[in-house]
Image: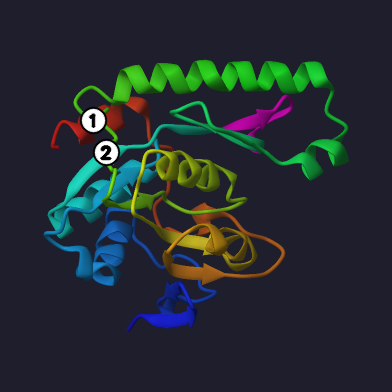
Amino acid sequence: MVSHIEENLFDFPDFRNKIAVFRDRNHAGEVLAEMLMMYKNTDAVVFAIPAGGVPVAAELAARLQISLEIAVVSKITLPWNTEAGYGAIAFDGTIILNEEMMQRLGLEESDIEKGIENTKIKVKRRIAEFQSGHASHKVSGRTAIIVDDGIASGYTMLVAVDALKKAGASQIIIAVPTAHFENIKQILPNVDAVYCANLRGGWSFAVADAYEFWSDVSEEEVIEILKGF
């Protein structure tokens, strides 16, 4: 049963603070579909964040029988750690930076500029690769359901929210299989609702821990999945 934790935050209590609750990303999409059945056969649009969010979003969109689009966003990674980011860039050029993190790490202005430029190039390339037939972002006056395979820092999701607001979405809904509770709380004021099946707390958090089977999703896999839509 879906639990109403805060005014606009919903989860599955049976999954709370547990790991390995999903077999894989497809199973996570099935679970999210159970939480979002009120959007079945509506004009809502699912926006998948590539690459990991695409299998989740495809399963969700198929079960709800609604449109699937791609919201190309990418985190701006640290020069010495490509898994960690200090901001993100969206398909429309929107940029969000974690100023506190940048100052704490003492990032040089040249490193920041290089990171932003490299990320812009990546976003542009992925738009060309992924959005053939999925590039309209015709969401004005419609509900946008933004899907990723999990939320760690939240900056990738925040930049997607900003970009889709600018595109005219009437409502912004976030649907993610797993997320850290503290970072979800930072996102809540910016959206209409968040549906997260597996909320977790604690000092250590990894999106992958929510899944029994986890591997990186290749760009080739993303293109193959999108052929079904």
In the rendered image, residue 205, in percent from the top left (x then y), is placed at 62, 59
Q: Earlier in the sequence, mark 1 or mark 2?
A: 2
The residue tagged with tag 1: helix, strand or loop?
loop
Quadrant of the rendered structure where residue 89 is?
Answer: top right
- Left or right of 142 on screen, residue 180: right
Residue 70 versus residue 173 in the image, above or below: above
Residue 10 versus residue 68 in the image, above or below: below
- Left or right of 135 on screen, residue 84: right
- x 41%, y 16%: residue: 125
Q: How many marks?
A: 2
In magenta, the rendered stretch is 75-85
The quarter of the picture where the C terminus appears is top left
Would you say residue 80 sits in the magenta stretch? yes
Q: Looking at the image, which is closer to me, 35 or 55?
A: 35
The residue identified by callout 1 is: 134
The residue identified by callout 2 is: 69
